Amino acid sequence: MSTRLTRTGDPNLQDPNSKDPNLEDPNVTDPNLTEPVVTGARVVGSWRAALLVVENHWTWYRRNWRATVISSFLQPVLFLLAMGVGFGSQVQVGEATDGYRYVVFLAPALLVITAVQNSMFESTWSVFAAFKWQRTYFAMVSSPLTSTQVLYGQLLWNAVRLAAGAIVFLGIAVALGAITSPSALLAVPFAVLAGMAFSAPAVAYTATREKPDSFNAIFRFLVMPMTLFTGGFYPMSQLPDWIHPLAWVTPVWHGIELARGVTFGTLRLLPALGHVAYLCALIALGVVLGRRYFHRRLAV
Amino acid sequence: MTRVTSTLVHAKGLTKHFGSFEAVRGIDVEVSKGEAFGFLGPNGAGKSSTMRMVSCVSPRTGGELSVLGMDPDVDGPKIRARIGVVPQQDNLDTELTIRQNLQVYGRYFGLSRAAVRERAVELMEFAQLSDRADAEVEPLSGGMKRRLTIARSLVNDPDLLLLDEPTTGLDPQARHLLWDRLFRLKQSGVTLIITTHYMDEAEQLCDRLVVMDGGRIAAEGSPSELIRQYSTKEVLELRFPPGEQSADEVRDLAERVEILPDRVLLYTADGEAALSAAHARGVRPVSSLVRRSTLEDVFLRLTGRTLVD
């Protein structure tokens, strides 16, 4: 480790600790102070770089996780209690609930809905703040990191957050008796996939915004309908036919089909591949646009 | 170990366009190792655009540019690994502590966790932030944030430090502390490139500077060279009640005369002599002042007194 700040002729700058061998770079054997000092600074590999961005978010999260608990965990749990346990007690077990108690029918869908709702906040407000309010993305690209690595790091972090949220939610659902089959664990990756299928395009969109005006509207008029009219709370067959194609383009519908199917053991291979392919396509679209918009915003 | 060549920044005919707006219109710049080099200019002169190109975050539109002997278009990340950047607007992680800001940023340069821990302690010492090490950044004063930004830019022990208006908006105490820290860096051999519109800052810190105006370089030299070339040794200021000033009686007493709403400025080698001569001719100003020419006189002569927004 270099200590050039302390290696000058100015006695005021002489740090008494600089003689500590631990501070010295092991590669520097000659303590000749006038030589340029080897620093450890270098360009890290692409994946490593994205992980370092994740590490930054993790540092933030360790300090601030309490503030996120309410929106990420408490809200879905309240939903599960109100809709599943409370309202669900009035719902007859039957064809509409795939033959399960309502809360059991609802839980895998709520897992997906929670992931998409959580991804909404991570992908809009947090990303916007990093561009506009704190400008931390600009600090990152002043280091060896590139705009693409910053994007990948953000998306990776979003995925980690969604996975953690889904696992905690699953644990609480088990405690409430809403999950009865261990196969529900397999629904977690599908929930994350659906969340990321919303997150990646949303992050790209946010990178084009100069003002945060549209985010509340997106939540009210895009995310809320996506969660209400895609078969999560009741079967799609209850809705008029013209709504069905609208539901099919949302990541939520595909995610619910996958999560419910794998939880109840009714998932068949071909439809599953179709759903996964569609969600992956949305992620790919988001990544391609995101790379372009991040570059445009950060490297001008 | 890479030996640094003596020219750290070389630009020739460097341009930057944003759409149809030409922010930088062909500038030639050479910065050598160990130098403190300044870009002076009014707002919109193209200083920040130039800095962003040199710091390899903004691609150039045209011309030649090499930084640390490499082309930013090809080796941007490699160059950025060896430079430090202090942007005009702080971009600290305000929800992290001072220490965490330094550690997290150091990691981007591939430094190990142990290395960034050590480095953060050194840098906080250097920036006089040690006693607030574990305080969150958000509520800190502007001066402390600025010092942290400068400390952060040093985390990779850069060969070249780029500071874009480092002291704008700070109170005099904070400015002097920052100047002191920058001066120490300069003494320890760090090459500095500074943009500023404070003349005292440029005179304090810069060995050599260019005055930019409208995307072009208007003048280049050391502060004293520029004063010699573009101004006179002294300036006599004669203050009159507004509207009563006139240059007619004194015009031949100076090399150059400038009439302002409340003052007449006489640029001359000997201010006292000019003042006695003016008195002898019966000129009776409300007050008078003889002072040395400063970089500010040069600046205003080169870039005009019109307000730039």
Image (cartoon, grey):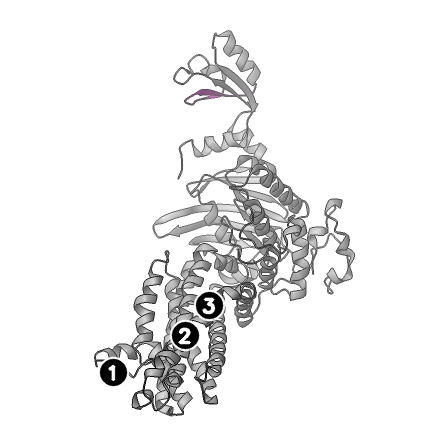
Amino acid tagged 3 = Ile
Secondary structure predominantly adopted by residues drawn in magenta = strand
Image quadrant where residue A91 sits: bottom left
CB under 8 Å between callouts 1 and 2? no
**Both labels 3 and 2 in a single chain:** yes
Judged from the image, the secondary structure of the residue bearing numbered disc 2 is helix
Taking the image as shown, residue A300 lies to the left or right of residue B190, namely left
Taking the image as shown, residue B137 lies to the left or right of residue A15, namely left
Total numbered labels: 3
User: Looking at the image, which is closer to me, B245 or A98?
Assistant: A98
Judged from the image, the secondary structure of the residue bearing numbered disc 3 is helix
Residue A289, how many percent across, how many down?
38, 68
Amino acid tagged 1 = Gln
Circle 2 Cα neighbour tier, 10 Å, few/some/many (<14 / 14–19 / ≥20): many
Residue B124 visible in the snapshot: yes
Circle 1 Cα neighbour tier, 10 Å, few/some/many (<14 / 14–19 / ≥20): few
Magenta span? B256-270
Give the mark nearest the N terminus, 3 or 2: 3
Q: Which residue matches tag 3?
A: A70
Q: Which residue matches tag 1?
A: A238
